[in-house]
Amino acid sequence: MRSVTYSMNVSLDGYIVGPDGSFDWTAPDPEVFRFWIDEIRDVGVHLMGRRLYEAMLYWETAAQDPSLGAAELEWVALWNPLPKVVFSTTLSTVQGQARLASGGVAAEIERLRAEPGEGDIAIGGATLATEAAAADLIDEYRVIVYPVLVGGGIPYFARDERRSDLELVETRTFNSKFVYLRYRVTRQSAP
């Protein structure tokens, strides 16, 4: 069965965006960017909300930017053909390999798991992750912690999420500044 992963950059105080809606503190670090390039290779489909979709729209036409380096062009080559499912009540159309979700997150994940396909089902965005976690559908949490305190905003973890026991699977430090944490959800077997 395809794994569902929730991956985002996060401030040390636990936010994916600051109180003003910005995430400029996640400015690309070459080593971290290389890591995300390698991670996207294992993704079969990416689920995202409207805000993340709109932020990632840049990449749809980025290949035309003559200032892009080899790493950015490699990202474009992997990201653009990747199937994406966008959850939005305000968008009526999406671009590229994206499609609008026809149902809720839980139904979409179950449908994707039932279809033939390879690669993880990646979730980007705290709102979608909260809904998936409430339905016990997230298998792994993956974060890169940035050394900044932003003091509020959108938290990586919803405050009303139920308890989930986790097993540390991997850690990695980048440039002695950023820390990657990968946790697998441990589910109790039925008696």
Image (spheres, grey):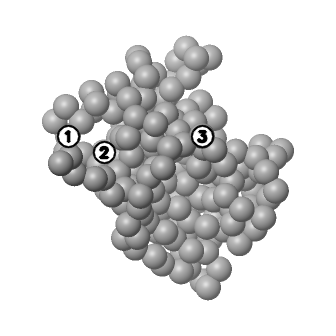
The amino acid type, in three-letter code, at marker 3 is: Asp
Image check: 181 left or right of 111?
right
Q: Position of residue 80 (x, y in %)?
A: 43, 43
- The residue sitting at 27% across, 27% down in the picture is 111
Mark 3 or 1 closer to N-term? Answer: 1
Viewer-side label of 3, 2: 3
Up the image or down, 140 lies above or below 160; here it is: below
Label 1 near label 2: C-beta < 8 Å?
yes
Q: CA distance from mark 2 to mark 1?
A: 7 Å
- The residue sitting at 29% across, 49% down in the picture is 3
The residue carrying mark 2 is 44
The amino acid type, in three-letter code, at marker 2 is: Gly
Image check: 97 left or right of 156?
left
135 and 141: which is toward the camera: 135
The residue carrying mark 3 is 160
The amino acid type, in three-letter code, at marker 1 is: Gly
63 and 32: which is toward the camera: 32
**Is residue 80 visible from the viewing direction of this image?**
no
Q: Position of residue 175 (x, y in %)?
A: 60, 83
169 and 29: which is toward the camera: 169
| SS for dot 1 | loop
* Residue 117 - label: 1
Instruction: Give the quadrant of the N terminus.
Output: top left
- The residue sitting at 78% across, 64% down in the picture is 149
